[in-house]
Protein backbone atom coordinates (compact mmCIF):
# COMPACT_ATOMS: atom_id res chain seq x y z
CA UNK A 1 0.00 0.00 0.00
CA UNK A 2 1.39 3.37 -0.94
CA UNK A 3 0.96 5.91 1.75
CA UNK A 4 0.13 9.35 0.49
CA UNK A 5 1.83 12.35 1.87
CA UNK A 6 -1.14 14.53 2.22
CA UNK A 7 0.24 17.57 3.92
CA UNK A 8 1.96 19.21 0.99
CA UNK A 9 -1.28 18.83 -0.97
CA UNK A 10 -3.54 19.86 1.87
CA UNK A 11 -5.63 22.99 1.54
CA UNK A 12 -3.81 24.43 4.56
CA UNK A 13 -0.47 24.12 2.84
CA UNK A 14 -1.73 25.41 -0.50
CA UNK A 15 -3.33 28.40 1.23
CA UNK A 16 -0.07 29.06 3.02
CA UNK A 17 1.97 28.93 -0.17
CA UNK A 18 -0.42 31.17 -2.05
CA UNK A 19 -0.82 33.78 0.66
CA UNK A 20 2.48 34.13 2.50
CA UNK A 21 5.45 35.27 0.42
CA UNK A 22 8.91 33.85 0.98
CA UNK A 23 11.48 36.60 1.38
CA UNK A 24 15.20 36.14 1.03
CA UNK A 25 17.09 38.55 3.24
CA UNK A 26 20.83 39.05 3.08
CA UNK A 27 22.23 40.30 6.33
CA UNK A 28 25.93 40.05 5.69
CA UNK A 29 28.04 40.40 2.59
CA UNK A 30 29.89 37.13 2.64
CA UNK A 31 29.01 34.34 0.17
CA UNK A 32 25.58 35.74 -0.54
CA UNK A 33 24.19 34.21 2.61
CA UNK A 34 20.52 34.87 2.86
CA UNK A 35 17.87 34.08 5.41
CA UNK A 36 14.57 32.73 4.28
CA UNK A 37 11.75 34.53 6.01
CA UNK A 38 7.98 34.09 6.08
CA UNK A 39 6.37 37.09 7.74
CA UNK A 40 2.59 36.91 8.21
CA UNK A 41 0.11 38.94 10.18
CA UNK A 42 -0.05 42.65 11.01
CA UNK A 43 3.28 44.41 10.50
CA UNK A 44 2.32 47.00 13.10
CA UNK A 45 3.01 44.38 15.77
CA UNK A 46 6.54 45.15 16.97
CA UNK A 47 7.04 42.10 19.15
CA UNK A 48 6.16 39.18 16.90
CA UNK A 49 6.48 35.48 17.42
CA UNK A 50 9.53 34.07 15.64
CA UNK A 51 9.81 30.40 14.76
CA UNK A 52 13.24 28.84 14.42
CA UNK A 53 13.18 25.46 12.68
CA UNK A 54 15.00 22.35 13.80
CA UNK A 55 18.20 21.49 11.96
CA UNK A 56 16.41 18.83 10.00
CA UNK A 57 13.60 21.16 8.99
CA UNK A 58 12.90 24.26 6.97
CA UNK A 59 10.89 27.35 7.88
CA UNK A 60 7.96 25.72 6.10
CA UNK A 61 7.53 23.15 8.84
CA UNK A 62 5.71 25.88 10.76
CA UNK A 63 3.16 26.58 8.05
CA UNK A 64 0.32 25.53 10.30
CA UNK A 65 1.37 28.02 12.96
CA UNK A 66 1.99 30.78 10.43
CA UNK A 67 -1.39 30.24 8.81
CA UNK A 68 -3.63 29.75 11.83
CA UNK A 69 -2.02 32.14 14.28
CA UNK A 70 -1.74 35.00 11.79
CA UNK A 71 -5.43 34.47 11.06
CA UNK A 72 -6.08 35.13 14.76
CA UNK A 73 -4.25 38.45 14.57
CA UNK A 74 -0.77 37.41 15.66
CA UNK A 75 2.29 38.50 13.71
CA UNK A 76 4.14 35.29 13.01
CA UNK A 77 7.58 35.04 11.42
CA UNK A 78 9.34 31.82 10.51
CA UNK A 79 13.02 32.10 9.68
CA UNK A 80 15.53 29.73 8.19
CA UNK A 81 19.23 30.41 8.54
CA UNK A 82 21.58 30.37 5.60
CA UNK A 83 23.14 26.96 5.51
CA UNK A 84 26.63 28.34 5.62
CA UNK A 85 26.73 28.92 9.35
CA UNK A 86 29.06 26.43 10.94
CA UNK A 87 28.82 27.30 14.59
CA UNK A 88 26.48 28.72 17.16
CA UNK A 89 28.24 32.04 17.28
CA UNK A 90 27.88 32.67 13.55
CA UNK A 91 24.27 31.75 13.78
CA UNK A 92 23.58 34.09 16.67
CA UNK A 93 25.34 37.02 15.00
CA UNK A 94 23.39 36.38 11.83
CA UNK A 95 20.12 36.17 13.73
CA UNK A 96 20.88 39.44 15.50
CA UNK A 97 21.52 41.10 12.15
CA UNK A 98 18.28 39.72 10.81
CA UNK A 99 16.34 41.15 13.76
CA UNK A 100 18.02 44.50 13.14
CA UNK A 101 17.04 44.31 9.51
CA UNK A 102 13.44 43.57 10.45
CA UNK A 103 13.66 46.39 13.02
CA UNK A 104 12.68 44.15 15.83
CA UNK A 105 13.93 44.78 19.30
CA UNK A 106 12.27 42.13 21.42
CA UNK A 107 10.59 39.00 20.12
CA UNK A 108 8.89 35.85 21.30
CA UNK A 109 10.92 32.84 20.24
CA UNK A 110 9.64 29.41 19.37
CA UNK A 111 12.25 26.79 18.65
CA UNK A 112 12.15 23.08 18.07
CA UNK A 113 15.04 20.71 18.55
CA UNK A 114 18.04 22.64 17.29
CA UNK A 115 16.05 25.84 17.14
CA UNK A 116 15.37 25.58 20.81
CA UNK A 117 18.91 24.58 21.52
CA UNK A 118 20.32 27.96 20.68
CA UNK A 119 18.89 28.94 23.98
CA UNK A 120 20.23 25.91 25.80
CA UNK A 121 23.52 24.60 27.12
CA UNK A 122 25.14 22.89 24.22
CA UNK A 123 25.86 19.74 26.11
CA UNK A 124 22.42 18.79 24.87
CA UNK A 125 23.39 19.50 21.31
CA UNK A 126 25.97 16.82 21.42
CA UNK A 127 23.50 14.22 22.48
CA UNK A 128 20.86 15.22 20.06
CA UNK A 129 20.82 13.12 16.97
CA UNK A 130 19.05 13.81 13.77
CA UNK A 131 15.67 12.12 13.97
CA UNK A 132 15.89 9.15 11.72
CA UNK A 133 12.70 10.13 9.90
CA UNK A 134 11.39 6.70 10.56
CA UNK A 135 8.41 6.42 12.77
CA UNK A 136 6.87 3.45 14.46
CA UNK A 137 3.72 5.41 15.00
CA UNK A 138 0.41 4.41 13.50
CA UNK A 139 -1.16 7.79 14.12
CA UNK A 140 -1.91 9.19 10.65
CA UNK A 141 -1.27 12.77 11.85
CA UNK A 142 2.23 11.81 12.90
CA UNK A 143 2.93 9.81 9.75
CA UNK A 144 1.85 12.76 7.61
CA UNK A 145 4.09 15.10 9.58
CA UNK A 146 7.11 12.85 9.13
CA UNK A 147 6.37 12.44 5.42
CA UNK A 148 6.10 16.18 5.02
CA UNK A 149 9.47 16.86 6.65
CA UNK A 150 11.02 14.06 4.63
CA UNK A 151 9.64 15.51 1.44
CA UNK A 152 10.76 19.05 2.18
CA UNK A 153 14.21 18.17 3.45
CA UNK A 154 15.38 14.76 2.39
CA UNK A 155 14.07 14.72 -1.17
CA UNK A 156 15.54 18.09 -2.18
CA UNK A 157 18.84 16.79 -0.87
CA UNK A 158 18.58 13.67 -2.94
CA UNK A 159 17.88 15.57 -6.12
CA UNK A 160 20.61 18.03 -5.25
CA UNK A 161 18.52 21.11 -4.76
CA UNK A 162 20.17 21.38 -1.39
CA UNK A 163 23.88 21.63 -1.66
CA UNK A 164 25.65 18.82 0.15
CA UNK A 165 27.83 21.36 1.85
CA UNK A 166 24.78 23.13 3.15
CA UNK A 167 23.41 19.94 4.59
CA UNK A 168 26.79 19.23 6.12
CA UNK A 169 26.64 22.62 7.82
CA UNK A 170 23.27 21.72 9.29
CA UNK A 171 24.47 18.39 10.55
CA UNK A 172 27.57 19.97 12.02
CA UNK A 173 25.46 22.51 13.82
CA UNK A 174 23.18 19.74 14.97
CA UNK A 175 25.91 17.61 16.45
CA UNK A 176 28.54 20.17 17.39
CA UNK A 177 29.27 20.82 20.98
CA UNK A 178 29.44 24.45 21.90
CA UNK A 179 28.37 26.11 25.04
CA UNK A 180 25.57 28.55 25.57
CA UNK A 181 25.69 29.61 29.18
CA UNK A 182 22.70 28.11 30.93
CA UNK A 183 22.94 30.56 33.81
CA UNK A 184 22.14 33.39 31.42
CA UNK A 185 18.82 31.91 30.45
CA UNK A 186 17.91 30.36 33.78
CA UNK A 187 16.34 33.62 34.86
CA UNK A 188 13.97 33.76 31.92
CA UNK A 189 10.57 34.17 33.43
CA UNK A 190 8.22 33.21 30.70
CA UNK A 191 9.21 29.96 29.10
CA UNK A 192 6.89 27.25 27.92
CA UNK A 193 8.43 23.86 27.27
CA UNK A 194 6.41 21.69 24.95
CA UNK A 195 6.94 18.00 25.18
CA UNK A 196 5.23 14.84 24.00
CA UNK A 197 4.80 11.59 25.85
CA UNK A 198 5.20 9.30 22.87
CA UNK A 199 8.39 8.32 21.11
CA UNK A 200 10.67 10.95 19.67
CA UNK A 201 14.34 11.65 19.09
CA UNK A 202 15.20 13.12 22.47
CA UNK A 203 16.17 10.66 25.16
CA UNK A 204 14.73 11.17 28.60
CA UNK A 205 17.90 12.39 30.40
CA UNK A 206 18.10 15.23 27.88
CA UNK A 207 14.45 15.91 28.48
CA UNK A 208 15.06 16.13 32.23
CA UNK A 209 18.01 18.47 31.68
CA UNK A 210 15.86 20.76 29.59
CA UNK A 211 13.27 20.82 32.34
CA UNK A 212 16.07 21.68 34.80
CA UNK A 213 17.44 24.43 32.57
CA UNK A 214 14.13 26.25 32.80
CA UNK A 215 13.03 25.84 36.41
CA UNK A 216 10.35 28.50 35.95
CA UNK A 217 9.18 27.05 32.67
CA UNK A 218 5.61 26.05 32.10
CA UNK A 219 5.40 22.45 30.99
CA UNK A 220 3.01 21.96 28.12
CA UNK A 221 2.89 18.23 27.69
CA UNK A 222 0.98 16.41 25.01
CA UNK A 223 0.11 12.75 24.85
CA UNK A 224 1.36 12.19 21.35
CA UNK A 225 2.95 14.13 18.53
CA UNK A 226 6.22 12.49 17.58
CA UNK A 227 9.19 14.55 16.44
CA UNK A 228 7.21 17.22 14.66
CA UNK A 229 4.35 17.97 16.97
CA UNK A 230 3.82 21.46 15.49
CA UNK A 231 2.82 19.68 12.29
CA UNK A 232 1.10 16.58 13.61
CA UNK A 233 -0.87 18.07 16.53
CA UNK A 234 -0.84 21.69 15.51
CA UNK A 235 -4.14 22.59 17.14
CA UNK A 236 -2.86 21.62 20.56
CA UNK A 237 0.44 23.37 19.93
CA UNK A 238 -1.34 26.52 18.84
CA UNK A 239 -3.46 26.50 21.99
CA UNK A 240 -0.29 26.32 24.08
CA UNK A 241 1.25 29.17 22.09
CA UNK A 242 -1.84 31.31 22.64
CA UNK A 243 -1.79 30.58 26.36
CA UNK A 244 1.89 31.51 26.49
CA UNK A 245 1.34 34.78 24.63
CA UNK A 246 -1.75 35.83 26.54
CA UNK A 247 0.36 37.09 29.45
CA UNK A 248 1.72 39.78 27.16
CA UNK A 249 -1.44 40.81 25.43
CA UNK A 250 -2.08 44.05 27.22
CA UNK A 251 1.52 45.31 27.18
CA UNK A 252 4.09 46.49 24.68
CA UNK A 253 5.27 42.91 24.14
CA UNK A 254 1.99 41.87 22.64
CA UNK A 255 2.31 39.65 19.59
CA UNK A 256 -1.29 40.20 18.60
CA UNK A 257 -2.76 43.30 17.01
CA UNK A 258 -6.05 43.65 18.82
CA UNK A 259 -5.67 42.79 22.48
CA UNK A 260 -8.31 40.36 23.57
CA UNK A 261 -11.50 42.22 24.30
CA UNK A 262 -12.20 41.74 27.98
CA UNK A 263 -14.93 44.32 28.22
CA UNK B 1 12.21 2.27 36.13
CA UNK B 2 13.65 4.70 33.65
CA UNK B 3 12.20 2.84 30.72
CA UNK B 4 8.74 2.70 32.17
CA UNK B 5 6.52 5.04 30.25
CA UNK B 6 4.84 7.73 32.22
CA UNK B 7 1.22 8.55 31.76
CA UNK B 8 -0.35 11.89 31.09
CA UNK B 9 -3.87 12.44 32.31
CA UNK B 10 -5.81 15.32 30.89
CA UNK B 11 -8.54 16.64 33.14
CA UNK B 12 -10.99 19.38 32.20
CA UNK B 13 -12.81 21.44 34.81
CA UNK B 14 -16.16 22.92 33.78
CA UNK B 15 -18.88 24.83 35.57
CA UNK B 16 -20.61 28.20 35.88
CA UNK B 17 -18.67 31.38 36.49
CA UNK B 18 -17.53 31.94 40.07
CA UNK B 19 -18.15 28.43 41.41
CA UNK B 20 -14.46 28.02 42.24
CA UNK B 21 -12.90 26.07 39.37
CA UNK B 22 -9.63 28.01 39.44
CA UNK B 23 -9.55 27.97 43.24
CA UNK B 24 -10.00 24.19 43.38
CA UNK B 25 -7.16 23.69 40.92
CA UNK B 26 -4.90 26.09 42.81
CA UNK B 27 -5.68 24.47 46.11
CA UNK B 28 -4.88 21.04 44.74
CA UNK B 29 -1.71 21.97 42.81
CA UNK B 30 -0.25 24.85 44.83
CA UNK B 31 -2.09 24.46 48.15
CA UNK B 32 -3.01 28.10 47.97
CA UNK B 33 -6.27 29.96 48.18
CA UNK B 34 -7.06 33.55 47.33
CA UNK B 35 -10.35 35.09 48.29
CA UNK B 36 -10.10 37.54 45.44
CA UNK B 37 -12.18 36.70 42.40
CA UNK B 38 -10.56 37.03 39.00
CA UNK B 39 -12.36 35.76 35.94
CA UNK B 40 -10.46 33.17 33.94
CA UNK B 41 -9.92 34.14 30.33
CA UNK B 42 -9.92 31.35 27.82
CA UNK B 43 -8.35 28.39 29.54
CA UNK B 44 -5.17 27.67 31.39
CA UNK B 45 -3.67 24.57 32.90
CA UNK B 46 -1.46 23.40 35.71
CA UNK B 47 0.36 20.11 35.97
CA UNK B 48 1.05 17.97 38.98
CA UNK B 49 2.72 14.59 39.33
CA UNK B 50 0.78 12.28 41.56
CA UNK B 51 0.90 8.67 42.67
CA UNK B 52 -2.05 6.47 41.81
CA UNK B 53 -1.79 2.82 42.83
CA UNK B 54 2.02 2.91 42.76
CA UNK B 55 2.15 4.62 39.41
CA UNK B 56 3.47 8.08 38.81
CA UNK B 57 1.16 9.97 36.52
CA UNK B 58 1.24 13.55 35.36
CA UNK B 59 -2.07 15.25 35.79
CA UNK B 60 -2.68 18.13 33.43
CA UNK B 61 -5.60 20.06 34.82
CA UNK B 62 -7.39 22.45 32.50
CA UNK B 63 -9.22 25.28 34.09
CA UNK B 64 -11.73 26.92 31.79
CA UNK B 65 -13.62 30.17 31.60
CA UNK B 66 -17.10 29.91 33.08
CA UNK B 67 -18.18 32.95 31.12
CA UNK B 68 -18.83 32.17 27.53
CA UNK B 69 -17.44 35.46 26.26
CA UNK B 70 -14.03 34.53 27.65
CA UNK B 71 -13.86 31.22 25.83
CA UNK B 72 -11.37 32.44 23.24
CA UNK B 73 -9.31 29.32 22.71
CA UNK B 74 -11.82 27.30 20.80
CA UNK B 75 -12.31 23.69 21.67
CA UNK B 76 -8.96 22.16 20.74
CA UNK B 77 -8.05 21.73 24.39
CA UNK B 78 -11.01 19.42 24.99
CA UNK B 79 -9.45 16.77 22.77
CA UNK B 80 -7.96 13.76 24.42
CA UNK B 81 -9.49 14.51 27.82
CA UNK B 82 -9.43 11.60 30.26
CA UNK B 83 -11.82 12.96 32.85
CA UNK B 84 -14.20 15.89 33.15
CA UNK B 85 -14.83 17.60 36.48
CA UNK B 86 -18.15 19.42 36.84
CA UNK B 87 -18.21 22.05 39.56
CA UNK B 88 -21.12 23.90 41.13
CA UNK B 89 -21.55 26.19 44.12
CA UNK B 90 -23.63 24.47 46.84
CA UNK B 91 -25.05 27.85 47.87
CA UNK B 92 -26.34 28.67 44.37
CA UNK B 93 -28.92 26.19 42.98
CA UNK B 94 -28.68 27.65 39.48
CA UNK B 95 -25.06 26.59 39.20
CA UNK B 96 -26.21 23.06 40.02
CA UNK B 97 -28.93 23.16 37.40
CA UNK B 98 -26.31 24.09 34.80
CA UNK B 99 -24.48 20.80 35.25
CA UNK B 100 -26.65 19.11 32.65
CA UNK B 101 -25.69 21.56 29.97
CA UNK B 102 -21.99 21.55 30.96
CA UNK B 103 -22.00 17.78 30.71
CA UNK B 104 -23.68 17.90 27.29
CA UNK B 105 -21.32 20.63 26.15
CA UNK B 106 -18.34 18.51 27.10
CA UNK B 107 -19.62 15.40 25.33
CA UNK B 108 -20.32 17.39 22.18
CA UNK B 109 -16.95 19.16 22.11
CA UNK B 110 -14.66 16.39 23.30
CA UNK B 111 -16.34 13.60 21.34
CA UNK B 112 -15.06 10.83 23.63
CA UNK B 113 -14.99 7.37 22.12
CA UNK B 114 -17.43 5.99 24.66
CA UNK B 115 -19.62 8.88 25.85
CA UNK B 116 -21.83 6.63 27.98
CA UNK B 117 -18.96 5.51 30.16
CA UNK B 118 -16.79 8.60 30.01
CA UNK B 119 -15.60 9.44 33.54
CA UNK B 120 -17.05 12.55 35.14
CA UNK B 121 -16.65 13.70 38.74
CA UNK B 122 -18.96 16.26 40.32
CA UNK B 123 -17.76 18.69 42.97
CA UNK B 124 -20.16 20.73 45.10
CA UNK B 125 -17.87 23.54 46.19
CA UNK B 126 -17.96 26.21 48.92
CA UNK B 127 -19.32 23.98 51.71
CA UNK B 128 -17.32 26.17 54.11
CA UNK B 129 -20.01 28.82 53.67
CA UNK B 130 -22.36 26.60 55.66
CA UNK B 131 -25.62 27.58 53.96
CA UNK B 132 -25.91 24.85 51.37
CA UNK B 133 -28.94 25.40 49.16
CA UNK B 134 -28.34 22.22 47.22
CA UNK B 135 -28.72 19.28 49.65
CA UNK B 136 -26.26 16.41 49.28
CA UNK B 137 -29.09 14.05 48.46
CA UNK B 138 -30.26 16.10 45.53
CA UNK B 139 -26.77 16.25 44.07
CA UNK B 140 -26.22 12.55 44.67
CA UNK B 141 -29.50 11.71 42.97
CA UNK B 142 -28.46 13.62 39.87
CA UNK B 143 -25.07 11.89 39.88
CA UNK B 144 -26.69 8.47 40.18
CA UNK B 145 -28.97 9.20 37.27
CA UNK B 146 -25.90 9.91 35.10
CA UNK B 147 -24.33 6.50 35.37
CA UNK B 148 -23.13 6.89 38.96
CA UNK B 149 -20.85 9.87 38.79
CA UNK B 150 -18.78 10.19 42.00
CA UNK B 151 -19.80 13.23 44.07
CA UNK B 152 -17.68 15.21 46.51
CA UNK B 153 -18.53 18.22 48.63
CA UNK B 154 -15.47 20.41 48.72
CA UNK B 155 -14.08 23.65 49.97
CA UNK B 156 -11.26 25.16 47.96
CA UNK B 157 -10.88 27.69 50.78
CA UNK B 158 -10.06 25.30 53.62
CA UNK B 159 -9.04 22.38 51.38
CA UNK B 160 -11.85 20.08 52.53
CA UNK B 161 -12.02 16.98 50.33
CA UNK B 162 -9.90 18.57 47.60
CA UNK B 163 -7.11 15.99 47.76
CA UNK B 164 -9.62 13.14 47.95
CA UNK B 165 -11.62 14.49 45.04
CA UNK B 166 -8.59 14.80 42.77
CA UNK B 167 -7.39 11.34 43.74
CA UNK B 168 -10.77 10.01 42.65
CA UNK B 169 -10.52 12.05 39.47
CA UNK B 170 -7.11 10.55 38.69
CA UNK B 171 -8.32 7.02 39.42
CA UNK B 172 -11.33 7.41 37.20
CA UNK B 173 -9.26 8.93 34.44
CA UNK B 174 -6.76 6.13 34.70
CA UNK B 175 -9.44 3.49 34.60
CA UNK B 176 -10.65 5.00 31.36
CA UNK B 177 -7.15 5.32 29.93
CA UNK B 178 -6.81 1.58 29.54
CA UNK B 179 -3.72 -0.41 30.30
CA UNK B 180 -3.14 -0.59 26.60
CA UNK B 181 -3.00 3.15 26.08
CA UNK B 182 -0.60 3.73 28.91
CA UNK B 183 1.85 0.90 28.92
CA UNK B 184 1.41 -1.29 25.93
CA UNK B 185 3.65 -0.90 22.95
CA UNK B 186 1.04 -2.24 20.60
CA UNK B 187 -0.94 0.50 18.95
CA UNK B 188 -4.48 0.30 17.67
CA UNK B 189 -5.05 -2.02 14.80
CA UNK B 190 -5.02 -0.56 11.33
CA UNK B 191 -7.79 -1.45 9.00
CA UNK B 192 -6.43 -1.99 5.55
CA UNK B 193 -9.80 -1.81 3.90
CA UNK B 194 -12.33 0.95 3.75
CA UNK B 195 -9.92 3.43 5.29
CA UNK B 196 -8.58 5.13 2.21
CA UNK B 197 -10.67 8.22 2.88
CA UNK B 198 -8.55 9.05 5.87
CA UNK B 199 -5.74 10.08 3.57
CA UNK B 200 -7.83 11.94 1.11
CA UNK B 201 -10.37 13.86 3.08
CA UNK B 202 -8.15 16.90 3.53
CA UNK B 203 -7.67 17.29 -0.16
CA UNK B 204 -8.77 20.46 -1.76
CA UNK B 205 -9.07 18.43 -4.92
CA UNK B 206 -11.98 17.40 -7.05
CA UNK B 207 -15.16 16.77 -5.13
CA UNK B 208 -17.34 15.85 -8.04
Image (tube, grey):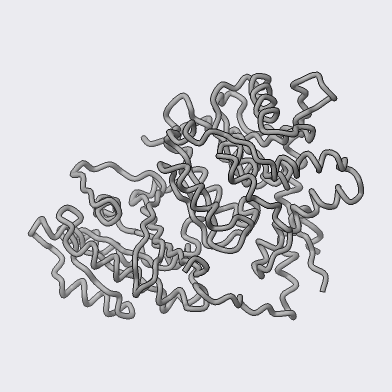
Query: Relative to residue A16, is residue B172 drawn left or right?
Result: left
Image position of A77 with respect to B187: above or below: above
Q: Position of residue B110 (x, y in %)?
A: 48, 64
Q: Above or below — where is B18 with respect to A170?
A: below
- Give residue A186's quadrant in the image: top left
The quarter in which the C terminus of chain B is drawn is bottom right
Query: In the image, B130: left or right of A184?
Result: left
* Residue B105 seen in the figure: no
Answer whether residue A43 is visible to the viewer in this image: yes
Q: Position of residue B22 (x, y in %)?
A: 29, 51
Q: Outermost residue, right direction?
A: A159
| Viewer-side residue, A212 vs A228 | A212
> Residue A59 is drawn in which quadrant?
top right
Seen at 50% across and 49% down, the residue is A209
Residue A152 x/y as whole percent? 79, 49
**Number of callouts:** 0
Residue in the image at 53% along x and 55% along y: A205
Left or right? Give the position of B181 relative to B19: right
- Residue B79: x, y in percent? 50, 62
Left or right of A113 in this view: A7? right
Observer-nearest residue: A237 or A163? A163
Amino acid sequence: MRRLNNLSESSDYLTFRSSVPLRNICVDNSDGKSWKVYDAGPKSVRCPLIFVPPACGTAEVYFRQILHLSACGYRVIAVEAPRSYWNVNDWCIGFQLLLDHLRLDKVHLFGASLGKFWMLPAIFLKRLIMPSLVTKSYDPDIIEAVDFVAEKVVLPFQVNTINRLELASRLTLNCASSRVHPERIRGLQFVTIMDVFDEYALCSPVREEIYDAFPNGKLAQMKTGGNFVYLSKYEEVNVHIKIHLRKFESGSYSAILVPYDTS
Amino acid sequence: MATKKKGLLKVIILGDTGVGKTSLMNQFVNRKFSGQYKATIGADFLTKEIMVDDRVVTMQIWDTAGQERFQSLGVAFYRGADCCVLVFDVTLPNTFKSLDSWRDEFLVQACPRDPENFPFVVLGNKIDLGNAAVPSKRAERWCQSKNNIPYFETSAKDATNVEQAFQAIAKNALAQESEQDLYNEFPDQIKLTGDSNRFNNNDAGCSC
